[in-house]
Image (cartoon, rainbow, N blue to C red):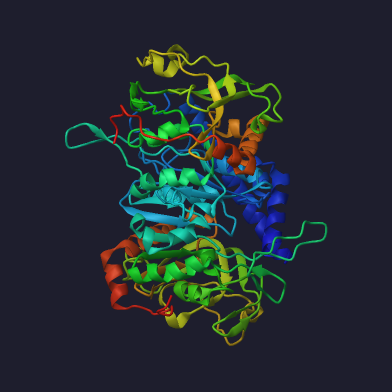
Amino acid sequence: MKTTLLKQLIVVSVGGLLVASAASTQLAGQAGAAGQAPGGAPAAQGGRGGRGGGGNIPQGGRGPIKVMVVTKGHVYEREPFFQMWDSWGSDITWSHVEHPAADVMLSPKYSKLFDVYAFFDLGGPGVGGGRAGQPAPVIPPGSFKTANNRFYPPPSEQFKTEFPKLLREGKGFVFLHHASAAWAHTWPEYSEVVGGACDWYAPQRIRGIDNPNHGYFGMTPQFISFVDKNHPITKGLGDGFYVTDEAYACHWFEDSVIPLARTDFQPADPTKNLNPKVKYSNLAAWVKTAENSPVFFTQVGHGSTAWATPAYRQLVLNAIKWAASPEALAWAKANPKRIFNASN
Amino acid sequence: MKILSRKFAWFAVALAIGVGSASLLAQGQWGSGPIKVAIITKGHNFDRDGFFNFWDSLGQDITWTHLQHPAALEFFDPAIADTFDVYAFYDAPGRTATPGPDGKPTYDQPNASARKNLIPFLQKGKGLVFLHHAPAAWNHTWPEYSEMIGSACDWGNPVTFKGKTYPNSGAQGGVKQHITVVNKTHPITQGIGDGFDIVDETYLCPVDEKAKGLIPLLRTDFEPIDKNFPGRYAGGWRYPEKGSQLAGWVRTAEKSPLVYLQNGHDAVAWKNPAFQTLVRNSIKWAASQEARDWAAKNPTKVRKPSNSNSN
């Protein structure tokens, strides 16, 4: 743990300096804008106080693909993350919608608003038992209690009812990095939608197999190899890319996904994080279907170091474009994966 | 353990390098307080880290959720409006002028459902807090919305308010002002004494100071006449009227308590202790049973002006 903490300190130090640098740049930009006629030009739908995707593209982009970006439940470097999304602003228009609002929006009732749903969340995050001298944590009602006294709230009944219907409608879904940990204890079908499950904070039962806490390995230099170079998401990106990013030892469902990329990272002792019955998977990206919807997941993308990697940005942008494409939607409808009971 | 070690890491780094944003992050994102606040943005760029760090600093009182358009307006549906206690608006959508078939500018429309749901939403009695540029939202396409706030702005296009057309609004950044408290008994102004100094962007927009039930809370000493907006004035911009010096008010919108604070352009304002107190008080007041009871007893009809040309 000491080694891990040291790694994280280094990661956070670098991240903090990047954030500080970004903030000072932004403030400098704002100071410049202050002397101008703010909002004076018709193009100033957001012409002040920050940056968009460049080329006079406002924050949130103005491209044709409408993306709902979901976060909450896991802290992250906000501005670098948003800047990555802005960098795709000529292709997408993105809207940030956090839990619990996101749970409401993930319904056919609101599906005309968005083409693709992108997740960098950790839905249903666990609450620890508290520490001495600290206020007792608020345990969400109906929570699942783990062996190490962590409490995980279930999704709302409305969400559980509506989300399967949205998947059956056929929309694009993109899951990034720690989104694989959402609802892992309380909604096993959700993990089947993603194609894997994680929890680094508590033991968990996945597909009937008991695992110890999963593994995370911060700022790990890795080479991500594309194992399917002809897929629209990877085509033209070469053999792969180097990235320094958090790696995982999680329970990926190798038998349920179409691999796109694998990492050369190998944990020293996979049995520390996985039941011996679960072979360590070095999957780093895949596609699959969930009901009638195309799904993409990549394990890469913890923080600003990964987000600043051009190949990573291109990979995720390609995934968004693919998930929104008529070809992907037709492919999913022709190859549906039934996950939820028809009554859902 | 991962969470704890990360929090420790953030704390350690904050101490080591003294980065303000990192130290704020150490307090935790989204807060953990009892008041559930939807923070609504889109349509106006802003310093996102600074803004969200500001909301994190209120985290003992609130748990906040960022919610952007077009999803945001769906929550005017009374069936889901109770997802949040207070709706805080820092948005300004509907300002992009696109030439229509007849050559006249057209603007983004609000969600069709929101037009239908606005009055039932307001009649539920939800806490509403509008900050800074939020009166610029939907002015060209939804006159009731500007009526609801009691003001309307657009710095890039002429404004229509209460059936009258005004020139492009004025905005001047980095203006040193003194804000005077004009209602010292209201819960929102507690803890800031007679007033405070602030460096912030100021506006010249139409404000309905005589709106039914409007209670002034704050006034700026900045004189809003066109010559005091030198950037625009030098470019030929003129504004025939002196603007309002109201910098904060409460009123009701149907049965909902509503707050507007004109301050809050950027991190300079967000880090001003008096502004922080004002926003914290505004959120707590808007969420309070006291405010909801007051609004229920003093309802104001929100209607499109009879002489409005907007659709």
Name the outermost residue toward the right.
A133
**Would residue A47 be visible to someone looking at this image?**
no
Q: Position of residue B83 (x, y in %)?
A: 53, 54
How many discs appear?
0
A105 relative position to B196: left or right: left
Quadrant position of the C terminus of chain A in the picture: bottom left
Rendered view: B100 above or below A131? above
Instruction: Name the one closer to the observer, A172 or B139.
Output: B139
The residue closer to the viewer here, A54 or A175, is: A175
> Which of B136 and B6 lies nearest the eye of the viewer?
B136
Instruction: Inspect this view and state whether residue B26 appears.
Output: yes
Look at 68% across and 75% down and name the residue there.
A146
**Where is residue B218 shown, x and y percent of the image?**
59, 24
Name the one closer to the observer, A230 or A149: A149
The image quadrant that residue A147 belongs to is bottom right
The quarter of the displayed image where residue B192 is located: top right
Horizontal relation, residue B307 to residue B119: left or right: left
Name the residue at the front extreme. Answer: B297
| Image location (x, y in percent) of residue A313 | 42, 56
Q: Dividing the image into 4 quarters, which one contains the N terminus of chain A?
A: bottom right
B12 vs B89, left or right, is right
Check the image and name the residue furthest to the left: B102
